[in-house]
Amino acid sequence: MTAIVLPTTTMPGQNEQESGGRLINCFVESLGETGPSKFKIVRVPGMDEWGTTPLTNFRGALQVNNTLYAAFNGDVVTWTGPGVGTVTTGGLPGDDPVFWARDMAVTPNVVVVSPDNGAFVVAGGATTAYPDVDVGSPNSVCYLKGRFVFSYGSGLMRQTGLNSTDINTTESATAESKPDTLYRVIAVGDTLLACGSNSIEFWRTNDETVGFAFSPVATHNRGIIHRYAIGGYEEGFGYGTFFVADDFSVRQLDGYASNKISPPDLDRLIEEVENKEEIQVSVYITQGHPMVVVQTLDWTWEYDVTLQRWHERQSYNMPRWRGSLPFKAFDVWMCGGIHDAALNADIYEIVTGLTTEDGEPLPVEIITGPLGSFPVGARVNRLDLFLSAAVGMAPGLPSIQTAPKIDIYVSKDLGLSWGNPWYREIGPQGLSPNVRVHNLGLCGPKGVKFKFGFSDQVHFAMMAGDVTTSPLRN
């Protein structure tokens, strides 16, 4: 009997035969020293509709006091609680993700920048052009130490007065450690980060009574790949700042430097993205796990900051997660929904333990690394799985809740092809069966790989697996 080495991080490889295993819509959670195993594999959180809108293409959101502001194609929508949102008048041009900021005025000023369309304010149910023409055409905005700070591709940064939208053009500065494009300004703690295409500059509050309120203190010689490729600074997260760098790696800021956290498989995916503006980095927290989301139109990877491991997300019939740009509002983590012909762009709550995404299945897929028998091959006599059993629900939906099953696939060519699945019950309520398959056939000297699929709407946790084999004669 040989233990199956379940993957603890996703490792697709450049092709299937090089894969060390994959985790899709599931991630590892430690069980401590006294658990039935060192870890279990559990499903990612689901999504439940929170707010609806007739609009398409979610572009980002911010809660200000008891109001949620969210941008969609051409408009801003507001909510004061779950349900149907209210579309503001005036409109917000563009379809690109936007940057939100608010100040600490008695009635907060709410500012939104659409990078290709300029700056706007939202107040009194209306979205209007920024009230000071000196704002020009910024590509981002943040709020720090009582002031809005705007950035411009040339490297210019402009600030407002304290808790005001007024701009004095003499109160400006230029990020000029390198002659690169300035994509973003963000506020991390009491530090202003000027994020360029080849550098990140760190600026701190100075003691000057006139002029720009921040002075440069350090420069990191790695930039961000594009304007949306940095996250973790958002309110409610607090586990660090993460970005896709100009060397195609994912990195975590560490003081004035950064540490690479991405594996080569992800680096290659990032390098292959033709339009780097598609790359987004965002964050949320589930079940005590801070997650960093790195995604494009074609794929989504997530990084568990605590356990320092990666997994993939794929929504039903999609190559990527249908969630977009998570944010915290009303004490829960939410996200928007991407839009296509079959999906809307509403606001969703990210719900721990929910086994669906807006009613659609949320299928788990675990692909193991190879169980080798080099160089002689083997007969695979039996497979045993250790799962959380008796998780069926009575009453519940027929089959998918009352009698949940796991799908078991075997590949004898290192994942190039998979045989027909075996289906095994993992236990209706009150019944804990042994999950076992006999006589799985012969495998060649490269060994055998397993794929486990689970999409039923009940709790899922996998702890271990064992295979009994007997070697073939040489």
Image (cartoon, grey):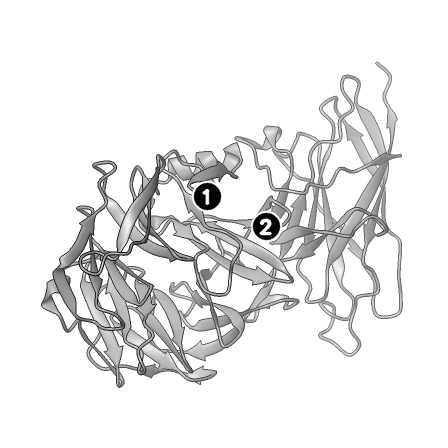
Q: Of the residues shown, which amino acid type is indicated by label 2? A: Asp
Secondary-structure class at tag 2? strand
In terms of depth relative to the viewer, which is nearer, 275 or 439? Answer: 275
The numbered disc on residue 169 is none
Question: Which residue is label 1 attached to?
Answer: 255
Question: Which residue is label 2 attached to?
Answer: 304
In the rendered structure, the answer to whether residue 362 lies left or right of residue 32 reads left
Indicate the position of residue 185 as horizontal and vertical percent values: 30, 54
Examine the image and state in which quarter residue 119 appears: bottom left
- Of the two numbered discs 2 and 1 on the same chain, state the one appearing first in sequence: 1
Is residue 389 something that shows in the picture? yes
Indicate the position of residue 51 as horizontal and vertical percent values: 45, 78
In the rendered structure, the answer to whether residue 384 lies left or right of residue 95 reads right
Mark 2 Cα shell of 10 Å, populated few (<14), some (14-19), many (≥20): many
Residue under the image location 30 percent in, 62 percent down:
98
In the rendered structure, the answer to whether residue 338 lies left or right of residue 453 reads left
Indicate the position of residue 40 as horizontal and vertical percent values: 75, 51
Secondary-structure class at tag 1? loop
In terms of depth relative to the viewer, which is nearer, 62 or 10? Answer: 62
Q: Of the residues shown, which amino acid type is indicated by label 1? A: Gly
Task: Tell us which disc is closer to us: 2 or 1.
Answer: 1
Total labels: the figure holds 2
Q: In the figure, 19 relative to 209: above or below?
A: above
In terms of depth relative to the viewer, which is nearer, 3 or 117? Answer: 117
